[in-house]
Image: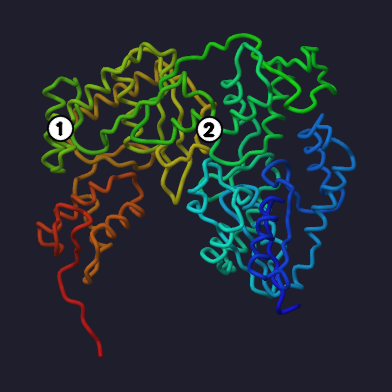
Amino acid sequence: MNHNKTLHVIAGYSAGDSLTKMLAKQNLMANHKVLVYWDDLSIGPLFSSVSSEGLKERITYLKKLYQGDPGLDNEEYYQIVEQHIRSFHDFPFADYAVIVVWHSRTASERLLFAWLCDLCQDYQGSFEMVDVKDDAFAALDYKILGLNYLKWQMLLTCYQRYRQVVPPKLVKLRAKQWRGKANSLLRICSGWEVVAVPETIFDNLILSLCDTIWQKAAQIVGKTLCCLDYPVSDFFIFYRLRTLIEQGQLIADGPENKPVNHSGDLLTMHHISIKLPREIISEKVLHVTAGCSALQTALKIQGLADSQTVIAIQDDLSLGILPLDFSVKSLKNRGDWWQSHYAADNYAADNYIDEMQNFLSTPFADYDKVVVWHGATVQDQLLLFLMCHIYDRPLHQVAVTGRMYDGVALTLSVLSPIEIIPLLSTVTAISNAQAESYRQQWQAWCQSSSTLRIMQDDKITAVAEDYFDDFVLSKCTIAWQSAARVVGYCLGYCGQYLSDDFFTRRLQHLVATGKLQAKGNTKQLRNFSIKLPGEVKCHR
């Protein structure tokens, strides 16, 4: 190992050129080398072996991706790709005292980092990374992230600001993730994690951007890329265009309106025009959800936002008495309960009546389909029962039950757009028998005097309002803690989907009954601290 040598690993030629320029400007090129990996790891099968057989599946996929391109669709290029992959795998990383891998929030860059972690698990030098944050891209005129878009001056700032040693646990984690992504064909970044998504994920968006008049394929590719918040290869979008043409969902014409021969005339995206074979009449759909979610964003990604609408009920149905007849009197009773238990402007009875009347006045019958989204939470289940109670026409549903996160069933509100998109194809009809059962369950809960409901054994169960008090006290100590911190613990470990308002109310009650002590303004969660009665003993 040469103790003076540093190796920089980065994805993409543009990023590599900017990094090389940055190092040269800082007079560091004598002891620093830039290793560029240019094959887009976000697309196509990955590989556990770099033998010809191990790379065969990836090369076969790339041939499909680049079909008809005069510059890339040839055996010489595919041999260059294979050699490039193999040379990176066999690179003498151990010869360098320091390895610095650069990445931002793109799937290709993060997968390169993961592959390098897999290759360097036994590396004895200093393994470092420059994990470029989103603020580095704030000055750009476009929203897509990626190191290829940064100039050398910004790379210097990132090098100084974000350079850090990669923790050994992270090396093992990313190496495991690399091996886990081998069989997927398309990967994107959702948040800060790389997730596998179906090849068809953008097909609906592409079709929504097409028309019954001719447009250049390049124009549709460009429009599609502009709708995305993360980098995706234009070759991949063009590949999906070609697939839609072969499936008959789009019509293509070649240069000078000559009919396209699908076996060879689909050259580059600039040489063909496309259109819809007929006008697509989109189904008008209303999605009903409990609380805020990323569903609208998922619909936008799929090109469905013009024909499909999301409406959310903000009322927390897990708490308080429930209204049976939705008269002003019944709604006022519930609003008064909120006001008395959670004294805040947004829980005033008049506000509650307005919100619920707006929801109930939604013209559900104007839609071809009404879809209720629900998970295995009290709020979601009661929304399902409520919709069956107020809507006497056939309903549809998307159930996210059975999905768990840290032992708690997931609900739509915690899913990212990428996690929601596959669920869009799981809409099922609610049978008349099911709807009647749900309607009866809503009526039964409206007649109950319970004001706190939780999920137990996949069923809604009524419990006393002080049910969680012992649990809350177990998260407190005789040392002062921020009330917000205790509420955070309770939210994370109670095993239910309950609001911070609920646990704040329980803290206030425990203070009022002398089971907790408080200092500060107890009406505002972030402005007071709490502790158990007693003093902290100091030991000398």
Indicate the position of residue 402 as horizontal and vertical percent values: 47, 39
Q: Quadrant of the C terminus?
A: bottom left
The one nearer the camera, 155 or 25, is: 25
* Marker disc for residue 93: none
Element carrying mark 1:
helix
Q: Which amino acid does label 2 sit on?
A: Ile
Q: Which image quadrant for residue 414?
A: top left
Please tell me which residue is depicted at 17% across the width and 30% down the height of the picture. Answer: 351
Residue under label 1: 335
The one nearer the camera, 522 or 491, is: 522
The reply, left or right, for residue 101 in relation to residue 515 is: right
Q: Which image quadrant for residue 154?
A: bottom right
Please tell me which residue is depicted at 26% across the width and 33% down the height of the picture. Answer: 315
Report, in whole angstroms, how far the alpha carbon at label 2 lies from the one at label 1. 35 Å
Q: Earlier in the sequence, mark 2 or mark 1?
A: 1
Indicate the position of residue 268 as horizontal and vertical percent values: 77, 28
Binning the other alpha carbons within 10 Å of mark 1 as few (below 14), some (14 to 19) or many (20 upward) gives many
Q: Are marks 2 and 1 in contact (CB under 8 Å)?
A: no
Q: Which image quadrant for residue 228?
A: top right
Indicate the position of residue 27 as horizontal and vertical percent values: 67, 70
The reply, left or right, for residue 410 in relation to residue 242 is: left
Residue under label 2: 421
